[in-house]
Amino acid sequence: MSTDFQHSREALGARLRDLRIEGGLNGKQFAELLGWPASKVSRLENGKQTATPDDLAAWALAAGAPESRSELQGRLRGLETHNRSWRRQLAAGQRAVQEANAAQEANAEVLHIFESSIVPGIFQTPEYARGVLTDVANRHGAPGDIEAGVRARMKRQDALYQPGHRFHTLVWEAALYTVRCDPAAMAAQLDRLAGVIGLETVALGVIPLGTRTPFSPKHGFWIIDDRLVIADTWNAELWLDAAEDVALYRKMWHLMSEAAVFDRQIHRLLDRARRALAPS
């Protein structure tokens, strides 16, 4: 979890504590009034749990300060600007998430992308995407609009063929071996990657396994027009727009680029991955 996000959550918790104390209630009394476990009040006040909008509305009312509801929910919106829970995003369905990504990409001119163990969504085949979105839905208990999500993800790829965009993309070679669909579909996905090499809008590099690097692959991220970093974690997307954060991710991207191979050398790595899929 990002330090900025945690600091913001702790600040929200401190404000909640102030409202409770101003209302003349101790933690146990406040929990009883709300019908919550005392531990929930403690976690919210200490920044150990993220409040929901309903939590904040109930808190404001119980503290005798209903007018503070808008302020509290504004703080929550600001907090979630930087930490976008996958569970909450997926509550609207897979299609909605993909369409939001498409809008982000359509409005961008230059994207720098890194993925450590998955083929970037912008290059995925329908079969590969179906496997990935099914896994995501199962993991987060998301709505089952998988096919609508796949269609929306494929629509995102229109940007690859439109002038005015540039996708500087790096993947770790491990992504070529991380099987997210059946072997035949995985082989087709490798062929798809080979097919984007040479596209005018794409610069694709692969970091070979065994290469000495001054970094470890942490998580995938997208840098959008050098103004915003979107980094994936298990539970959320981090949206980072502070200048120092963007600069750090650009530095890491350049270090990774120096370790990558391009053009014909990628075909050699793709061929090696295809052979690993063949039955022994």
Image (spheres, rainbow, N blue to C red):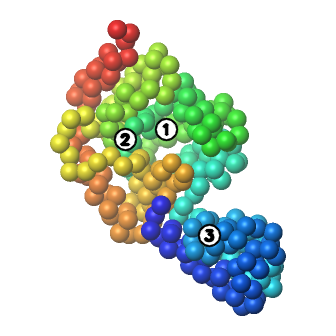
Which residue position is annotated with label 1? 121
- For residue 34, above or below residue 155: below
Would residue 216 appear left or right of 112 to someone viewing this image? left
Q: Which mark is residue 29?
A: none
Q: Is residue 80 left or right of residue 63?
A: left
Image quadrant occupied by the C terminus: top left
Circle 1: element type: helix
Q: In the image, what residue type sits under mark 2?
A: Ser
Residue at disc 3, secondary structure: helix
Q: Does the CB distance between marks 3 and 2 fall below 8 Å?
A: no
Which of labels 1 and 3 is toward the front? Answer: 3
Mark 2 — residue? Answer: 116
> Does residue 166 show up?
no
Check disc 1: other Cα within 10 Å, few if <14, some if 14-19, many if 20+: some
| Amino acid marked by disc 1 | Gly
* Image vertical order of residue 143 relative to residue 24, above or below: above
Give how far apart the Cα atoms at labels 3 and 2 are. Answer: 34 Å
Q: Sequence order check: which comes first, mark 3 or mark 2?
A: 3
Q: Which quarter of the figure has residue 246?
A: bottom left
Residue in the image at 81% along x and 85% along y: 64
Asked whether 188 or 56 is in front, the reply is 56
Callout in the foreground (2, 1): 2
The disc, 1 or 3, on the residue closer to the chain's N-terminal end is 3
The residue beneath circle 3 is: 43
Q: Quadrant of residue 229?
A: bottom left
Count of numbered marks: 3
User: Residue, x 55% and y 28% (percent of image)?
Assistant: 131
